[in-house]
Image (spheres, coloured by chain):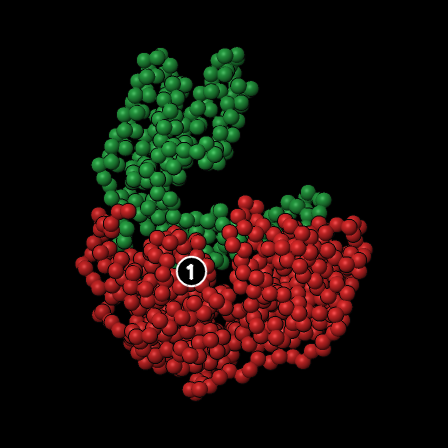
Amino acid sequence: MEGPVPPRDTLGAPRVPGTGPFEHEEVGPATVRLAGFGFRHASRRAWAVQDVDLRIEPGERVLLTGASGSGKSTLLRALGGLLEPESGDATGELSVDGAAPDRRRQRVGVVFQDPDAQLVMTRAGDDVAFGLENTGTPPELIWPAVDTALDAVGFGLGRDHATAALSGGQKQRLVLAGALAPRPGLLLLDEPTAQLDPDGAALVRAAVARAVADRSATLVVVDHDVESWLPLVDRVVELLPHGGTVEHPPGWRPAPLRVPVRWVHPPGEVLLAGEAAGFTHRGGARPALAPTDVALRAGRTLAVTGPNGTGKSTLALLLAGLRAPTTGRVVAAATVTAGLRRPERPPHRWPAAELATRIGTVFQQPEHQFLTGRVRDELALGPLRSGAGAAQARATAEELLERLGLAALADANPFTLSGGQQRRLSVATALATSPRVLVLDEPTFGQDRETWAELVALLAEQQDGDRALCLVTHDAAVVTALADDVCTLGAPVPG
Amino acid sequence: MSAPLSLGPARPVPLSAVNPVAQLSAVLVVTCVLLISGDLVTPGVLLAAELALLPAAGLSRPGDVLRRTWPLLLSALGVAWVNVAFGSLDGAEAWVSGATWALRVVALALPGILLVASTDPVRLADALTLHWRVSTRFAYGSLAALRLVPLLAAEWETIRLARRARGVDGGRNPVAHVRLLASTAFALLVGAIRRGSRLATAMDARGFDSGVTRTNARGSRLQPLDRCFVVGAVVLCAAAVTASVLSGAWSPVFS
């Protein structure tokens, strides 16, 4: 390994890491001021953020919360100076250390949701160094700063660890180290745990707690998951959907989740079963899913849980007839296979149109499943593909629009809906073909409380005596609210 | 999900000691000579030297070599076959012409394979920006984008399965298969663009390309070895051409 060598061409005047070339050099935690601040994206009629008045003192830790669509992320981008002036209209005042945020970019560190859309380099240390290189930090000062930042977040794997080989939580911890390395006065976190499993999320929150323990940076977290951040923050500020904010008093806790009352059915016949069903990726050293026995019964809801890497999602794909098990088999009951041209075949060999009317699947990312440009067409698509007439398909679509409260959005483009609306639509599209079995992969993942309650109520309605539900989830609250039976997948099979 | 495609740091091999820009310069020299030469001797000599470098690039097991080169070997065979089957020459001359072409194709492409096998992508970007003044925006932007490529493979599979779950597949109709492929590719593209723009925002937030002159934490050093490597490539090419001229085989393409 070569030691760090100054590059030939660029050595500016030596500077302390984290101080910018803009204006006078500020150090220490930043002050944030917002007065009557609002922002409207170009081409939108409604304001994304409106009437926000907020003073954040140096070293304070603030949680900005609010339902999805309340403009939390827009506000965070504004604080980071990341909203281009031409991307919309701003009103009111917004300052970081008394200047416009785009003049304070080097005082601000930002962590976004998706770790894979934030890492640049192939090695952990190089990635943390990236921000320091960008600010023109002399090479001899970079590596000590990198080590300090890696230590601050508790990343113990070393500088040379490949970034591609990290888990989601570890990646996000590395992203945090990269944001901290230039010693920002303001640290902005935009739902940093939304794409992580509970273990990864806990890892990241612990890293944040450790990094801001000395109050050397002002912290602003944007998240709809209030409870997890309460121990760490000083203040909770909620953005209201139609503008303005409300600050919750110390000791405030969010209202408990609304859990629907539901009817528990006696176990009916087994509609779909995995018999020692397992899966190994081609060329994979160890199975993605160890052989598993599982039965989905009519009128019952089975929750599949377990730590990451045990193959929960893989099991969902096998049961959904989307992947062929490499060991064991998936068997459907005669009442499910009735009407198939080749009923003796396993579900993964059924034609798609016949699969959709028997086993419905809702994927983690609703957008993967959308195929048309209108909500109404989206709902009619499944019935049309599986042989219903145009009139019948239209009627099914209209009925679902009414039932799921999507009627006002019938002509909207599915891709423009909010996260919660998309999730409801994706469940509705699976229901449109009235399958006997419904498989859902992490249906409540990353949803705000309102959407969570809506979804759980919607799923509770589907638990009639005829249908079997399978929920793959990390969300313990969903298991409590909906599941009759729980299948916990064990620890990964050692290599 | 699927790991084998991931873009990671390259395992250091003996050839990695040569700076990527020195390797690129050598590749350039060899390429020029091969493009000019039209005989069998010049690519033969150069190919022998390239094959001798394979172990230094960590490709000593025949299996590894084959895994990296099979598309190349296949296309070389294709080129040779086209020449033998459809060329204007007959008999032994046709075979010589085919062999010449195949040899040239392999000798031209093998340096690239050696470079990829021995060069860490980050070190390549460092060397290009520091020594050849390639724009940092281009070099590190490409690097960041390359990291996203393996994710596309997993995404493709998910979109395909999600469509089957919606009741959409090609069935037995080849036209439907093509249309499905096109629409899946479009969905993948839309997703890639969205992720790419999120990546650009994140890099922006980290001060990338903000007008400040960028420093480099790793540096990239040019050593005597690098000069030797380039000089070696030039000497080798001279030797190959000399051997070709002396043996009477030399026939440059534009004569």
Element under label 1? helix
Residue sitting at x 53%, y 22%:
B81
Q: Amino acid at mark 1?
A: Lys
User: Residue B25, percent across and down?
Assistant: 31, 35
User: Residue B143, percent across and down?
Assistant: 39, 50
Q: Which residue is mark 1?
A: A171
Chain B: its colour in the image is green
Q: Relative to residue B232, is residue A92 drawn left or right?
A: right
Report the label total. Answer: 1
User: For the view shown, which residue lies furthest in the left direction?
Assistant: A13
Structural crowding at the residue carrying mark 1, measured as other residues with C-alpha within 10 Å and reported as few (<14), some (14–19) or many (≥20): many
User: Residue B210, percent across and down?
Assistant: 31, 59
User: Residue A152, percent across and down?
Assistant: 32, 67
A273 over A4 or under it: above or below? below
Residue sitting at x 36%, y 56%:
A124
Chain A: its colour in the image is red
Residue sitting at x 38%, y 24%:
B48
B36 over A156 or under it: above or below? above
User: For the view shown, which residue lies furthest in the right direction?
Assistant: A339
Residue sitting at x 37%, y 73%:
A209
